[in-house]
Amino acid sequence: MSVCPLVRLSHSAAAHTRTRYKYVKGQAAGAPCLAQPSRQQGTLPPGAMACVAGCRCCTERRRQSSILYNILKNEEQPEAAQQPPPQEPQGPGCSCGSRRRVALRSPQVAGKAASAVLVKTLRFVKSVPCFRELPLDEQLVLVRGCWAPLLVLGLAQERVHFETVETAEPSMLQRILTDRRQEQQGQQHPQSCSPQLPSAGEIQGIKGFLAKCWSLDISTKEYAYLKGTVLFNPDLPGLQCVQYIQGLQREAQQALNEHVRLIHRGDQARFAKLNVVLSLLRSINANVIAELFFKPIIGTVNMDDMLLEMLCAKL
């Protein structure tokens, strides 16, 4: 009977797994199912051997003293961020209301909470054996492509609450005058160098996703399988081991299905509900997440550089 590494990992999602897994040999390309645990060194299917051969380690060469790393390393999550906020009054439906620009009511509190979740998320990702077997280039493509949905899943798992407030935007005349003045001074157009604040509609989508997860009371194991499904996304551009990663995603989905059928026998629709959660993650915009949670505490940040630093650091 085949055992997916995510099944073993879910028993201790935050701990590093020392067990090596031996892959089944002689199977068709694109179906990298895993055999029983073995103490031998794991080997990848033929389609992925060339990718792993190019793996290189840069952990010792990366600096761990940068400002970004020190801020994200602070895992003391304020309790205020986990307290349910008071219900905000809902006005009548209006399409223009969803376009209002909003910001965090307590940016330092929510930003540090999100930073702690990001550190835990990267620690979880690096503890997955099949992820560690991939070359660094493949790891970076996966992490850069899925860090935002993984972070939002982590916010749901840690039950992080946050409030937003509407911000006053400059009038059209102010924008014209500001743009003209900066053009005369030879400066770059402001809208091209700094992204806009998130809209109320975008924030409502994130809060709606969190509410959906909390209503389902998702367990730790289910969160682990959901994260595995999101992490191993074969549709990301730039991947070389596409079939191998597609097989890992399929295994994560199968493990989730088997777990749901075993634990929630009376709820035959639960697996479908969890897949709805995954579909909602597709609307999560990484730029919105970075602008909302990280810019208030560390300024404009290049998430690709920060993820590379965290991926190569010892978290």
Image (cartoon, rainbow, N blue to C red):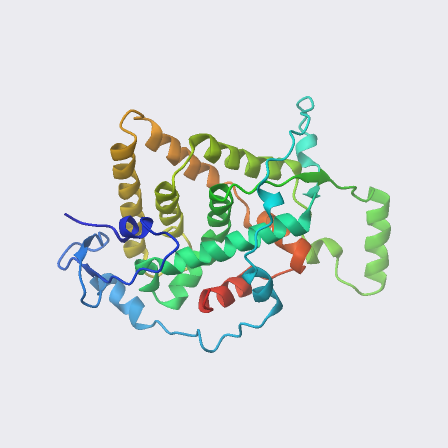
- Picture residue at 82% right of the left edge, 48% below the top: 175
Residue 280 spot, x, y in % from top left: 47, 37
Q: Which of 20 and 48 lies nearest the eye of the viewer?
A: 20
Q: Which of 248 and 152 lies nearest the eye of the viewer?
A: 152
Residue 202 spot, x, y in % from top left: 60, 39
Res 62 visible:
yes
- Indicate left or right for 123 with 164 as reference: left
- Indicate left or right for 77 with 1 as reference: right
- Indicate left or right for 310 with 40 as reference: right
Q: Quadrant of residue 126?
A: bottom left
Q: How many marks?
A: 0
- Picture residue at 28% right of the left edge, 54% below the top: 243
- Picture residue at 81% right of the left edge, 44% below the top: 170
Q: Quadrant of residue 37?
A: bottom left
Rendered position, 20 above or below 195: below
Q: Which of 240 and 110 lies nearest the eye of the viewer?
A: 110
Q: Residue furthest top?
A: 92
Rendered position, 28 above or below 87: below
Residue 64 spot, x, y in % from top left: 53, 72
- Indicate left or right for 162 with 190 as reference: left
Residue 6 spot, x, y in % from top left: 30, 50
